[in-house]
Image: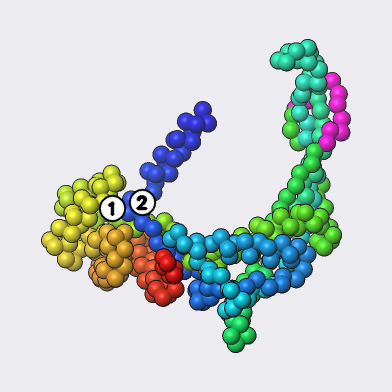
Amino acid sequence: MRFFFFLAATALLAACQTPGYDYEARIAPNFPQAADYRAPEVGRFRGPAGDVAEGELEAMIADIRLDGMSWFMPTQGRPDSLYEGRVDIEAWDEEVRYERERRCVKHDGLFDCKRHAMVETECTTGSVAVAVTATLVDLADNRTVFTAAQPGGSARETCIDIAEYPDDGRPEGVYRDPRQSNYNPYNAPIGMVEDAVVEAVRRFRYDIAPYNKTLRAEIMTEGLIPEEQNDTRFGLAVDATKGGNFLGACAQWDELARAYPRAPAVLHNQGACAEARGDMETAQLRYARAAELASGIPLLKDKKARLIFEALERVSGRRYDDMLLDGTLPRSGS
Protein backbone atom coordinates (compact mmCIF):
# COMPACT_ATOMS: atom_id res chain seq x y z
CA MET A 1 0.00 0.00 0.00
CA ARG A 2 2.82 2.42 0.85
CA PHE A 3 4.41 1.78 -2.55
CA PHE A 4 1.18 2.50 -4.43
CA PHE A 5 0.57 5.59 -2.30
CA PHE A 6 4.08 6.81 -3.23
CA LEU A 7 3.38 6.25 -6.94
CA ALA A 8 0.08 8.09 -6.68
CA ALA A 9 1.71 11.01 -4.86
CA THR A 10 4.49 11.17 -7.48
CA ALA A 11 1.97 11.15 -10.32
CA LEU A 12 -0.07 13.87 -8.62
CA LEU A 13 3.06 16.02 -8.17
CA ALA A 14 3.99 15.60 -11.83
CA ALA A 15 0.45 16.44 -12.90
CA CYS A 16 0.49 19.64 -10.83
CA GLN A 17 3.88 20.78 -12.15
CA THR A 18 3.80 23.47 -14.83
CA PRO A 19 5.10 21.96 -18.10
CA GLY A 20 8.38 23.22 -19.45
CA TYR A 21 11.92 22.34 -20.44
CA ASP A 22 14.53 21.26 -17.88
CA TYR A 23 18.17 22.22 -18.30
CA GLU A 24 21.40 22.36 -16.29
CA ALA A 25 22.71 25.78 -15.27
CA ARG A 26 25.78 27.08 -13.47
CA ILE A 27 24.75 29.20 -10.51
CA ALA A 28 26.99 31.80 -8.88
CA PRO A 29 27.56 31.47 -5.12
CA ASN A 30 25.22 33.33 -2.77
CA PHE A 31 28.12 35.72 -2.17
CA PRO A 32 29.18 36.28 -5.81
CA GLN A 33 32.47 37.95 -4.86
CA ALA A 34 33.62 34.62 -3.38
CA ALA A 35 34.03 33.30 -6.94
CA ASP A 36 37.08 35.55 -7.37
CA TYR A 37 39.07 33.60 -4.76
CA ARG A 38 40.24 30.22 -6.03
CA ALA A 39 43.07 29.48 -3.57
CA PRO A 40 41.71 30.00 -0.06
CA GLU A 41 43.26 28.84 3.17
CA VAL A 42 41.29 27.85 6.28
CA GLY A 43 42.40 29.65 9.42
CA ARG A 44 41.18 29.46 12.99
CA PHE A 45 37.55 29.08 14.07
CA ARG A 46 37.20 30.11 17.69
CA GLY A 47 34.76 28.55 20.13
CA PRO A 48 33.69 25.01 21.05
CA ALA A 49 34.31 22.47 18.26
CA GLY A 50 36.14 25.15 16.29
CA ASP A 51 38.63 22.52 15.15
CA VAL A 52 35.72 20.52 13.71
CA ALA A 53 34.55 23.58 11.75
CA GLU A 54 38.07 24.05 10.38
CA GLY A 55 38.38 20.40 9.32
CA GLU A 56 34.94 20.29 7.72
CA LEU A 57 35.54 23.48 5.76
CA GLU A 58 38.95 22.26 4.56
CA ALA A 59 37.37 18.99 3.41
CA MET A 60 34.55 20.84 1.64
CA ILE A 61 36.95 23.13 -0.21
CA ALA A 62 38.99 20.13 -1.36
CA ASP A 63 35.87 18.30 -2.52
CA ILE A 64 33.99 21.01 -4.44
CA ARG A 65 33.86 20.31 -8.16
CA LEU A 66 32.21 22.08 -11.09
CA ASP A 67 31.69 20.38 -14.43
CA GLY A 68 33.84 17.49 -13.21
CA MET A 69 36.86 19.57 -12.20
CA SER A 70 38.02 20.91 -8.86
CA TRP A 71 36.87 24.47 -8.34
CA PHE A 72 39.49 25.49 -5.81
CA MET A 73 43.17 25.28 -6.74
CA PRO A 74 46.01 24.19 -4.44
CA THR A 75 47.49 27.18 -2.64
CA GLN A 76 51.09 25.90 -3.02
CA GLY A 77 52.00 28.19 -0.16
CA ARG A 78 50.44 31.23 -1.86
CA PRO A 79 46.81 31.49 -0.70
CA ASP A 80 44.83 34.43 -2.05
CA SER A 81 42.31 34.47 0.80
CA LEU A 82 41.54 33.16 4.26
CA TYR A 83 38.42 31.69 5.85
CA GLU A 84 38.19 32.21 9.60
CA GLY A 85 35.36 32.46 12.09
CA ARG A 86 33.76 31.22 15.25
CA VAL A 87 31.28 28.74 16.71
CA ASP A 88 28.51 29.82 19.08
CA ILE A 89 26.20 27.42 20.91
CA GLU A 90 22.71 28.87 20.71
CA ALA A 91 20.71 26.37 22.80
CA TRP A 92 20.74 23.05 24.62
CA ASP A 93 17.27 21.69 25.34
CA GLU A 94 15.75 18.44 26.51
CA GLU A 95 12.25 17.02 26.17
CA VAL A 96 11.11 14.05 28.24
CA ARG A 97 8.13 12.09 26.85
CA TYR A 98 6.13 9.38 28.61
CA GLU A 99 4.57 6.67 26.45
CA ARG A 100 2.75 3.41 26.99
CA GLU A 101 2.70 0.37 24.68
CA ARG A 102 1.36 -3.16 24.66
CA ARG A 103 4.31 -5.55 24.39
CA CYS A 104 4.94 -9.27 24.42
CA VAL A 105 7.01 -9.95 27.54
CA LYS A 106 7.08 -13.74 27.45
CA HIS A 107 7.43 -16.07 24.45
CA ASP A 108 6.81 -19.80 24.08
CA GLY A 109 8.45 -19.77 20.68
CA LEU A 110 9.76 -17.44 18.01
CA PHE A 111 6.28 -16.29 16.93
CA ASP A 112 4.30 -17.54 19.91
CA CYS A 113 3.62 -14.92 22.57
CA LYS A 114 2.60 -16.36 25.92
CA ARG A 115 1.99 -13.12 27.80
CA HIS A 116 1.40 -9.47 26.93
CA ALA A 117 1.92 -6.61 29.30
CA MET A 118 1.66 -2.82 29.32
CA VAL A 119 5.10 -1.18 29.37
CA GLU A 120 5.67 2.49 30.16
CA THR A 121 8.76 4.19 28.77
CA GLU A 122 10.52 7.46 29.40
CA CYS A 123 12.21 8.93 26.32
CA THR A 124 14.59 11.85 26.61
CA THR A 125 15.47 13.83 23.47
CA GLY A 126 18.32 16.28 23.77
CA SER A 127 18.87 18.90 21.07
CA VAL A 128 21.69 21.35 20.48
CA ALA A 129 21.61 24.38 18.17
CA VAL A 130 24.74 26.20 17.02
CA ALA A 131 25.65 29.05 14.70
CA VAL A 132 28.90 28.97 12.73
CA THR A 133 30.11 32.33 11.44
CA ALA A 134 32.66 32.43 8.61
CA THR A 135 34.54 35.42 7.21
CA LEU A 136 36.42 35.47 3.92
CA VAL A 137 39.43 37.80 4.01
CA ASP A 138 41.35 39.02 0.96
CA LEU A 139 44.98 38.47 1.95
CA ALA A 140 46.37 40.94 -0.57
CA ASP A 141 44.89 43.95 1.22
CA ASN A 142 43.55 42.37 4.43
CA ARG A 143 40.00 43.24 3.40
CA THR A 144 36.84 41.42 4.51
CA VAL A 145 35.07 40.05 1.44
CA PHE A 146 31.99 38.73 3.24
CA THR A 147 30.81 37.42 6.59
CA ALA A 148 27.99 34.91 6.91
CA ALA A 149 26.47 32.73 9.62
CA GLN A 150 24.83 29.34 9.16
CA PRO A 151 22.75 27.37 11.69
CA GLY A 152 23.24 23.75 12.61
CA GLY A 153 21.56 21.32 14.95
CA SER A 154 21.78 17.82 16.35
CA ALA A 155 19.54 15.60 18.46
CA ARG A 156 19.91 12.37 20.42
CA GLU A 157 17.22 10.25 22.01
CA THR A 158 17.41 7.64 24.77
CA CYS A 159 14.47 5.57 26.01
CA ILE A 160 14.19 3.44 29.17
CA ASP A 161 11.39 1.24 30.52
CA ILE A 162 10.10 2.61 33.82
CA ALA A 163 7.06 0.40 34.54
CA GLU A 164 5.49 -2.93 33.54
CA TYR A 165 2.08 -4.25 34.57
CA PRO A 166 -0.61 -6.65 33.31
CA ASP A 167 -2.46 -5.64 30.16
CA ASP A 168 -5.61 -4.09 31.56
CA GLY A 169 -6.88 -2.53 28.34
CA ARG A 170 -5.48 0.96 28.86
CA PRO A 171 -4.88 2.91 25.62
CA GLU A 172 -1.39 3.00 24.15
CA GLY A 173 0.53 6.17 23.38
CA VAL A 174 1.33 9.28 25.40
CA TYR A 175 -0.09 9.10 28.89
CA ARG A 176 1.19 12.31 30.48
CA ASP A 177 2.41 15.71 29.38
CA PRO A 178 6.03 15.98 28.22
CA ARG A 179 8.55 17.87 30.30
CA GLN A 180 10.73 20.58 28.75
CA SER A 181 14.09 21.71 30.12
CA ASN A 182 16.58 24.37 29.00
CA TYR A 183 20.19 24.28 30.09
CA ASN A 184 23.28 26.46 29.85
CA PRO A 185 24.28 26.08 26.18
CA TYR A 186 27.99 25.96 26.93
CA ASN A 187 27.51 22.84 29.07
CA ALA A 188 26.07 20.93 26.08
CA PRO A 189 27.61 17.52 25.30
CA ILE A 190 30.59 18.13 23.04
CA GLY A 191 29.65 15.25 20.73
CA MET A 192 26.29 16.87 19.98
CA VAL A 193 27.98 20.23 19.47
CA GLU A 194 30.38 18.66 16.96
CA ASP A 195 27.51 17.05 15.03
CA ALA A 196 25.67 20.39 14.89
CA VAL A 197 28.82 22.17 13.68
CA VAL A 198 29.24 19.66 10.85
CA GLU A 199 25.69 20.37 9.68
CA ALA A 200 26.22 24.14 9.87
CA VAL A 201 29.48 24.10 7.89
CA ARG A 202 27.88 22.06 5.10
CA ARG A 203 25.42 24.90 4.58
CA PHE A 204 28.27 27.14 3.40
CA ARG A 205 28.59 25.12 0.19
CA TYR A 206 26.38 27.47 -1.81
CA ASP A 207 27.92 30.59 -0.24
CA ILE A 208 31.52 30.01 -1.28
CA ALA A 209 31.55 28.46 -4.76
CA PRO A 210 29.44 28.06 -7.93
CA TYR A 211 27.29 24.98 -8.38
CA ASN A 212 25.20 23.21 -11.02
CA LYS A 213 21.45 23.12 -10.68
CA THR A 214 18.57 21.77 -12.76
CA LEU A 215 16.21 24.58 -13.71
CA ARG A 216 12.92 24.54 -15.58
CA ALA A 217 11.94 27.00 -18.28
CA GLU A 218 8.18 26.81 -17.79
CA ILE A 219 5.77 27.45 -20.64
CA MET A 220 2.43 29.22 -20.62
CA THR A 221 -0.37 26.74 -21.25
CA GLU A 222 -2.95 29.37 -22.20
CA GLY A 223 -2.81 32.30 -24.58
CA LEU A 224 -3.34 35.86 -23.43
CA ILE A 225 -4.84 37.28 -26.62
CA PRO A 226 -7.55 35.81 -28.93
CA GLU A 227 -5.16 34.93 -31.78
CA GLU A 228 -3.09 32.52 -29.68
CA GLN A 229 -6.09 31.37 -27.64
CA ASN A 230 -7.99 30.24 -30.74
CA ASP A 231 -5.17 28.64 -32.74
CA THR A 232 -5.24 24.85 -32.30
CA ARG A 233 -1.47 24.74 -32.86
CA PHE A 234 -1.00 26.39 -29.47
CA GLY A 235 -2.66 23.47 -27.67
CA LEU A 236 -0.74 20.96 -29.78
CA ALA A 237 2.55 22.60 -28.80
CA VAL A 238 1.56 22.49 -25.13
CA ASP A 239 0.73 18.78 -25.50
CA ALA A 240 4.08 18.17 -27.23
CA THR A 241 5.83 19.84 -24.29
CA LYS A 242 3.94 17.70 -21.78
CA GLY A 243 4.91 14.63 -23.79
CA GLY A 244 8.61 15.54 -23.71
CA ASN A 245 8.85 16.40 -27.42
CA PHE A 246 11.15 19.40 -27.04
CA LEU A 247 12.09 19.79 -30.71
CA GLY A 248 8.54 19.46 -32.00
CA ALA A 249 7.13 21.87 -29.45
CA CYS A 250 9.83 24.50 -30.05
CA ALA A 251 9.37 24.26 -33.83
CA GLN A 252 5.68 24.91 -33.28
CA TRP A 253 6.36 27.96 -31.08
CA ASP A 254 8.65 29.35 -33.80
CA GLU A 255 5.93 28.86 -36.41
CA LEU A 256 3.32 30.54 -34.19
CA ALA A 257 5.68 33.45 -33.47
CA ARG A 258 5.99 34.11 -37.20
CA ALA A 259 2.20 34.09 -37.51
CA TYR A 260 1.56 36.18 -34.38
CA PRO A 261 4.59 38.39 -33.62
CA ARG A 262 2.62 40.30 -30.96
CA ALA A 263 1.35 37.23 -29.03
CA PRO A 264 2.92 37.39 -25.54
CA ALA A 265 2.35 33.76 -24.52
CA VAL A 266 3.84 32.50 -27.79
CA LEU A 267 6.88 34.78 -27.41
CA HIS A 268 7.30 33.63 -23.80
CA ASN A 269 7.24 29.97 -24.85
CA GLN A 270 9.68 30.71 -27.66
CA GLY A 271 11.91 32.28 -25.01
CA ALA A 272 11.61 29.12 -22.88
CA CYS A 273 13.01 27.11 -25.78
CA ALA A 274 15.96 29.50 -26.12
CA GLU A 275 16.58 29.34 -22.38
CA ALA A 276 16.64 25.54 -22.37
CA ARG A 277 19.11 25.59 -25.29
CA GLY A 278 21.39 27.87 -23.28
CA ASP A 279 20.83 30.95 -25.47
CA MET A 280 20.15 33.35 -22.61
CA GLU A 281 20.48 36.48 -24.75
CA THR A 282 17.66 35.41 -27.08
CA ALA A 283 15.59 34.16 -24.15
CA GLN A 284 15.92 37.50 -22.38
CA LEU A 285 14.85 39.38 -25.53
CA ARG A 286 11.79 37.14 -26.00
CA TYR A 287 10.75 37.37 -22.36
CA ALA A 288 11.24 41.14 -22.31
CA ARG A 289 9.10 41.59 -25.43
CA ALA A 290 6.43 39.26 -23.99
CA ALA A 291 6.43 41.28 -20.76
CA GLU A 292 6.06 44.52 -22.73
CA LEU A 293 3.11 43.17 -24.73
CA ALA A 294 1.42 41.64 -21.68
CA SER A 295 1.69 44.94 -19.82
CA GLY A 296 -0.31 46.58 -22.60
CA ILE A 297 -3.28 44.18 -22.41
CA PRO A 298 -6.24 45.99 -20.77
CA LEU A 299 -7.66 44.42 -17.57
CA LEU A 300 -5.20 41.49 -17.66
CA LYS A 301 -4.93 39.89 -14.24
CA ASP A 302 -1.41 39.83 -12.83
CA LYS A 303 -1.41 36.08 -12.15
CA LYS A 304 -2.04 35.32 -15.84
CA ALA A 305 1.23 37.00 -16.82
CA ARG A 306 3.18 35.91 -13.70
CA LEU A 307 5.31 33.34 -15.57
CA ILE A 308 6.53 35.96 -18.05
CA PHE A 309 7.91 38.30 -15.41
CA GLU A 310 9.37 35.44 -13.34
CA ALA A 311 11.12 34.09 -16.44
CA LEU A 312 12.57 37.52 -17.28
CA GLU A 313 13.96 37.81 -13.75
CA ARG A 314 15.35 34.25 -13.83
CA VAL A 315 17.15 34.66 -17.16
CA SER A 316 18.55 38.02 -16.11
CA GLY A 317 20.03 36.19 -13.13
CA ARG A 318 21.44 33.45 -15.37
CA ARG A 319 23.12 36.02 -17.62
CA TYR A 320 24.63 37.68 -14.55
CA ASP A 321 25.92 34.31 -13.33
CA ASP A 322 27.46 33.52 -16.72
CA MET A 323 29.12 36.93 -16.92
CA LEU A 324 30.47 36.58 -13.39
CA LEU A 325 31.84 33.07 -13.94
CA ASP A 326 33.12 33.54 -17.50
CA GLY A 327 36.68 34.35 -16.50
CA THR A 328 36.88 31.95 -13.56
CA LEU A 329 35.46 28.67 -14.89
CA PRO A 330 37.82 25.70 -14.56
CA ARG A 331 39.29 24.41 -17.78
CA SER A 332 40.71 20.98 -18.45
CA GLY A 333 44.48 20.92 -18.39
CA SER A 334 44.73 24.17 -16.41
Placement of 181 over or under 165, stated as above or below: below
Tell me which numbered mark, 1 or 2, is placed earlier along the sequence: 2
Quarter occupied by the C terminus: bottom left
In the rendered image, the vertical position of residue 199 relative to residue 331, given as above or below:
above
- The magenta span reads 160-171
Q: Where is 275 relative to 38, above or below?
A: above
Residue drawn at x 62%, y 61% is: 59
Say whether residue 224 is visible: no
- Picture coordinates of residue 120, whole percent (x, y): 82, 31
Give the amino acid at mark 2: Thr
Q: Residue 206 at what x, y percent from top left?
A: 54, 64
| Residue plotted at (75% across, 13% down) | 109
For the residue carrying disc 2, how many other residues have a C-alpha within 10 Å: few (<14), some (14-19), or many (20+)?
some
Residue 253 seen in render: yes
Q: Quadrant of residue 145?
A: bottom right
Instruction: State the scheme by which the image is colored.
Output: rainbow
Which residue is tagged 1? 221
